[in-house]
């Protein structure tokens, strides 16, 4: 459903993503793992064009965009890709002056122009799915980190994206609060939600992902079935990483 071909991303002279190709199947969960600075966030941000790749091709559903240095990327093409993705950030990024319910309704009302009643019903349904039905009227600042992240997940799902992109969704959380987020992501995975998750939390990755991609210095060192990559890594580099944090 998503296909990245020969993606490169430079920031000035610094090459951060170096010729990465990967496929994400519908209903699968892909974990991007590896050391800090390896390019996980940048690759994730290239998928929804928060970063514009320097070169390569991205296919997402029926949208295909080719990138080349100096080539302008049409706004329509960008919108077409963005509409199909939902993003969850490490630090939640909820709208602080809106309740949990309003946070989830926001995109439906302002972007999709849904009537408020319909948007509210959908938002309540999603907040129930992430175990936040009891907190619909709460302000973000009164919620725990785990609760805020669950609202952020509901908000990302509201637009019915084809793929949910999560950047270190548990990294800002204490282990106990991380667990409730892992539970929610794992439930979504079981329901067939397509996800790409950048994380250095191997517990999250091994619990939720079926495919794992190990990135270092902007390159794929190793990729394959998650149990295989985490259980019996082929490359020395992956082996060291897995044993250092498990
Ligand atoms: P990870 O998520 O694996 O920790 P990142 O994708 O955040 O890695 O970063 C990969 C590299 O790209 C790092 O060297 C980082 O400093 C660099 N980088 C990321 N974003 C930018 C940017 N906007 N400008 C310049 N360098 C960046
Ligand atoms: Mg990162």
Image (tube, grey):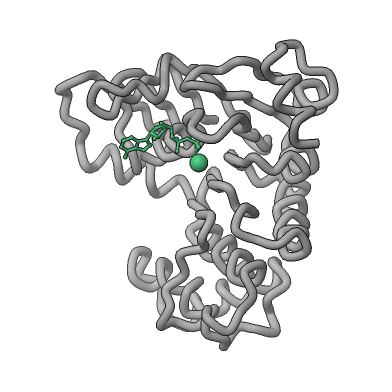
The quadrant of the picture showing ligand 1 is top left
**Where is 35 relative to 162, above or below?**
above
Residue 74 visible in image: yes
The image quadrant of residue 49 is top left
Q: How many marks?
A: 0
Left or right, 93 with respect to 15, comes to right
**Where is 92 relative to 46, above or below?**
below
Foreground residue, 191 or 168? 168
Foreground residue, 25 or 112? 25
Residue drawn at point x = 47 percent, y = 30 percent: 39
**Where is 190 relative to 104, above or below?**
above
Q: Quadrant of the C terminus?
A: top right
Residue 61 visible in image: no
In the image, residue 148 lies at what x, y percent?
59, 70
The image quadrant of residue 202 is top right
Residue drawn at point x = 28 percent, y = 37 percent: 77
**Where is 13 relative to 26, above or below?**
above
In the image, residue 62 lies at what x, y percent?
42, 31
Foreground residue, 116 or 226? 226
Residue most toward the right? 231
Residue drawn at point x = 43 percent, y = 68 percent: 108
In the image, residue 95 lies at what x, y percent?
42, 73
């Amino acid at each position: 459903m998503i296909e990245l071909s020969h993606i490169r991303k430079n920031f000035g002279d610094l090459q951060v993503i170096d010729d990465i190709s990967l496929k994400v199947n519908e209903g699968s969960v892909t974990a991007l793992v590896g050391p800090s600075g390896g390019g996980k966030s940048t690759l994730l941000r290239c998928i929804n064009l928060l970063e514009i790749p320097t070169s390569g091709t991205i296919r997402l559903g029926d949208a295909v965009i080719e990138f080349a240095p100096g080539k302008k990327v049409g706004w329509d093409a960008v919108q077409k890709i963005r509409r199909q993705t939902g993003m969850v950030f490490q630090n939640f990024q909820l709208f602080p002056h809106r309740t949990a319910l309003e946070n989830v309704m926001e995109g439906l009302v302002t972007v999709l122009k849904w009537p408020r009643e319909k948007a509210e019903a959908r938002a309540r349904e999603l907040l129930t799915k992430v175990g936040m039905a009891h907190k619909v009227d709460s302000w973000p600042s009164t919620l725990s980190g785990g609760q805020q992240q669950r609202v952020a997940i509901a908000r990302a799902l509201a637009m019915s994206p084809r793929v949910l992109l999560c950047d270190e969704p548990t990294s800002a959380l204490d282990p106990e609060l991380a667990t409730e987020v892992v539970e929610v992501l794992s439930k979504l995975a079981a329901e067939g939600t397509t996800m790409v998750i950048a994380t250095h939390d191997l517990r999250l990755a091994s619990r939720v992902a079926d495919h794992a991609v190990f990135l270092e210095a902007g390159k794929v060192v190793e990729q394959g079935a998650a149990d295989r990559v985490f259980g019996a890594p082929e490359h020395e580099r992956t082996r060291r990483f897995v044993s250092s944090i498990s």
